[in-house]
Amino acid sequence: VRGGNQTPIVELILLGFSNSPELQPVLFLLLVVIYIAAVAGNLLIIVLVVADPHLHTPMYYFVANLSAVEICYISTTLPRLLASLLTGDRTISLQNCIVQFEFYGILSTVECLILTAMCYDRYLAIRHPLRYTALMNGRVCSHMVAGCWIFTISYAIMVHIFILQLTYCGPKEIDHFFCDFAPVKDPFCGETQTLQWLTLVLAVILAIWFFLFTLATYICIIVSILRIPSSTGRKKAFSTCSSHLIVVMVYYVSTMTVFVVPLLNPPAILHKIMSVLYVVLIPLVNPLIYCLRNKEIHQSLKKDTVCSVKVLSPPTIMNKYFLIPLVTCLIYCL
């Protein structure tokens, strides 16, 4: 704490959205519907991909893992907000606030890395179709996803170590609906230079390098598609990456909006609304995009054998890998 004799802050207050009692039930019902729809849609994607052998391909492996991350991601922020709207209790301990903030950072970073891995997968599928199955097998896919988690968790541990050495000296009331210290000016006191450098390095890597990598990759993909002589071949090739391209566009537009808008010093309510779009829009829209635009998902939905236990019984190596996203969701929820 900045003052020498001040009591250390151990509990924070998240102001949320509205102090009007009339708006609380409406906002609660709206967010409950959104949360259920997002979780159900992403869980449906995971179950379909795990259950249907026709979806045991690298593309849908990444889609299932992305859906698992989306469920964990939206479950990090919305349940706490819903509980606050239902009970009126807006307090949260500083320790729990830091944990929520770190889980939010971990899952958003893993989401970015998996989207980049999906981009590389589509690049190999379009540019090297004959060698695609050899280059992107189940083991390679699982190693890529594991690498995303290992990198992110390792970085989060380093950040957490530095945070533990600091003292929270920001305001007790945070004008936000979840624990995001970005709107707070100088939330920690002490030797914060190393923490600021770590945060800056991550922001540069994720916001610039991965964005440029994705942009360059899709330029190569589009050039390759345009070189295909037949219109049918071009249409088929583009359909294999159109869903991911839309998801990437939604992700980067939402991300850039959330991080650029605060630089313009907007009202706090506008920043919170943009954060809701970022936290809620991506987990809600992604399953809709993949369900509406993929014929394989449509066919899998129409099959009566989707819920059959027989589909899950073959002990193939791909089944083992495709159970990973489902287990990830279960572990996180427990």
Image (cartoon, rainbow, N blue to C red):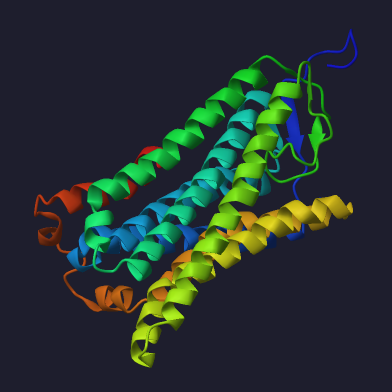
Residue 300 shown left or right of residue 195 in the figure: left
Answer yes or no: is residue 18 visible.
Answer: no
How far from the left and from the top, in percent, is residue 221?
45, 70
How far from the left and from the top, in percent, is residue 283?
52, 59
Image point 19% across, 47% down: which residue?
320
Residue 165 shown left or right of residue 130 in the figure: right
- Corner quadrant of residue 54: bottom left
Image point 25% across, 73% down: which residue?
300
Residue nearest the viewer, comparing 127 with 311: 127
Image point 54% across, 56% down: which residue?
213
Question: For the image shown, how many numbered marks are present on the structure?
Answer: 0
Residue 317, relative to residue 179: is it above or below? below
Question: Which residue in the rendered view is the most extreme toward the bottom?
Answer: 231
Residue nearest the viewer, comparing 97 with 132: 132
Residue 294, relative to residue 149: is it above or below? below
Answer yes or no: is residue 160 visible.
Answer: yes
Looking at the rendered image, the quarter that the C terminus falls into is top left
How far from the left and from the top, in percent, is residue 125?
33, 66
Looking at the rendered image, the quarter that the N terminus falls into is top right
Residue 45, relative to residue 171: is it above or below? below
How far from the left and from the top, in percent, is residue 299?
26, 78
Residue 283 shown left or right of residue 271 in the figure: left
Image point 34% across, 90% down: which residue?
232
- Corner quadrant of residue 61: bottom left
